[in-house]
Image (cartoon, grey):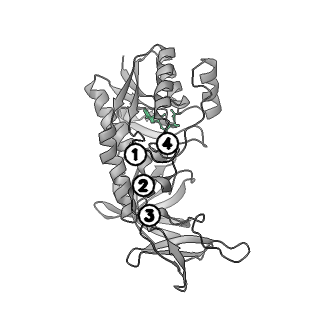
């Protein structure tokens, strides 16, 4: 019988994951990963203590052993440093995707193996399918509103081989019902929001603490007109409309960020429109490729999610070098950001992902 370490966040999804594995007769234990505590006392509440209490109460209710695994150092070096370095260099990093590869199915999985476990289970909305030769694939979660496979796009085959997602076949309301029927102590707990480690803190407040402001001009992309001043390019992402601080002075027209000019330290804006310079792209280049199984063949048609919560769209995938591919879209895509992740699919099967290194 397999021994499984369940990553328990204190939330209801991972609680039900543990419950289902227990009912299926696996030998399981629960573990909370201590990744980040609010030691610098940045604004906002950091619910990690409450989360540990909740996870521990669920483990007790299920009658399984529970432990807290301290991964704060690894989290700082592999996720927070990547995040801050990315923002400082003008790109938009994706800590949630990297957390799955580097932490949950990286150091945490290594920890589990070192401690005699065969697999790590999480409460992700994703499914594992065993293909021929017992090879495993990741398939989208059954609940279209909750599917989290995008966040698993950078997982490697050796990680997929030891991952288990016990709740991926459920719809969220079904999962809540299971939690309530089983009287799990956190059955009514609200879903967590935002970036996994910074809790309820806004990203801009977090960045303000760690990345110095670097003011520069806000410029209209079409005609180079100076419109105002920004506090630092890292506070902005392409496609952003809120918080630019420049009124359009026209009904039903809004400024949107369309680019960053690193040399001039300038934020480029334009009115929201399909023709806004740089806002929509039909092609991009993607590097740091990672595949969950066999890489797709060169020059083929696939699908992709250009960001979390976007539907899959048809693409053409063409290799340029060993580690760079060109992706072309049938329909132009809005606001692709350097440093973000594109997830590749064959139907509902997750093939892998990569990082946008050139847009347009
Ligand atoms: N600090 C943590 N300790 C242990 N496991 C964690 C932690 N954070 C996340 N996880 C695991 O990763 C999964 C996905 O994390 P995410 O932050 O997306 O939570 P979620 O979908 O809201 O799930 P949950 O309801 O279990 O919190 C969780 O279901 C859990 O298995």
Which is more toward the observer, 144 or 186? Answer: 186
- Note whether 225 is above or below 126 in the view shown: below
Of helix, strand and loop, which one carries label 3? helix
Label 1, label 3: how many angstroms apart (C-alpha)? 20 Å
Name the front one of labels 2 and 4: 2
Name the front one of labels 1 and 3: 1
Which is more toward the observer, 132 or 151? Answer: 151
Marked residue nearer the N-terminal end (1 or 2) = 1
Q: Is mark 3 in CB contact (under 8 Å) with mark 4?
A: no
- Which picture quadrant has residue 276? bottom right
Residue at the limit of the structure toward the top, as seen here = 63
Residue at the limit of the structure toward the front, as seen here = 41
Q: Which mark is residue 234?
A: 3
Label 3 C-beta lies within 8 Å of the nearest ligand 1 atom: no
Q: Position of residue 186 (x, y in %)?
A: 57, 25
Q: Is mark 1 in CB contact (under 8 Å) with mark 2?
A: yes
Name the front one of labels 1 and 4: 1
Which is more toward the observer, 80 or 276? Answer: 80
Q: Which mark is residue 199?
A: 4
Marked residue nearer the N-terminal end (2 or 4) = 4
Which residue is painted at 58% across and 64% down in the image?
A: 243
Q: Is mark 1 in CB contact (under 8 Å) with mark 3?
A: no
Residue indicated by mark 2: 209
> Label 2: how many residues lie within 10 Å, few (<14), some (14-19) or many (20+)?
few
Marked residue nearer the N-terminal end (3 or 4) = 4
- Which picture quadrant has residue 41? top left
């Amino acid at each position: 019988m397999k021994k499984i370490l369940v990553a328990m966040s204190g939330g209801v999804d991972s609680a039900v994951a543990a419950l289902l594995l227990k009912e299926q007769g696996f030998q399981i234990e629960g573990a909370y990963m201590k990744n980040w505590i609010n030691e610098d006392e940045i604004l906002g509440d950091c619910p990690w203590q409450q989360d540990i209490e909740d996870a521990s109460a669920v483990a007790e209710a299920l009658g399984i052993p529970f432990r807290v695994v301290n991964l704060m150092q690894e989290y700082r070096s592999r996720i927070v440093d990547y995040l801050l370095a990315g923002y400082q260099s003008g790109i938009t990093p994706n800590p949630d995707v990297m957390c799955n590869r580097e932490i949950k199915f990286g150091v945490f999985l290594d920890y589990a193996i070192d401690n005699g476990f065969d697999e790590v289970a999480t409460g992700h909305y994703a499914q594992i399918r065993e293909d021929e030769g017992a090879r495993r694939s990741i398939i989208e979660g059954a609940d279209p509103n909750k599917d989290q496979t995008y966040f698993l796009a950078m997982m490697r085959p050796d990680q997929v081989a030891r991952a288990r997602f016990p709740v991926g076949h459920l719809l969220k309301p079904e999962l809540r019902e299971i939690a309530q029927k089983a009287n799990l102590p956190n059955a009514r707990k609200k879903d967590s929001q935002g970036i996994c480690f910074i809790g309820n803190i806004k990203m801009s407040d977090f960045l303000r603490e760690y990345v110095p402001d670097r003011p520069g001009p806000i410029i209209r992309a079409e005609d180079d007109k100076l419109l105002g001043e920004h506090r630092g390019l890292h506070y902005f992402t392409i496609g952003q409309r809120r918080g630019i601080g420049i009124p359009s002075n026209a009904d039903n027209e809004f400024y949107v960020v369309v680019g960053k000019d690193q040399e001039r330290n300038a934020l480029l804006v334009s009115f929201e429109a399909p023709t806004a310079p740089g806002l929509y792209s039909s092609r991009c280049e993607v590097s740091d490729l990672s595949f969950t199984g066999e890489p797709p063949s060169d020059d083929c048609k696939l699908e992709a999610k250009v960001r979390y919560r976007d539907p899959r769209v048809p693409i053409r995938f063409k290799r340029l070098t060993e580690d760079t591919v060109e992706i072309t879209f049938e329909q132009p895509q809005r606001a692709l950001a350097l440093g973000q992740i594109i997830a590749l699919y064959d139907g509902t099967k997750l093939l892998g992902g990569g990082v946008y290194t050139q847009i347009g």
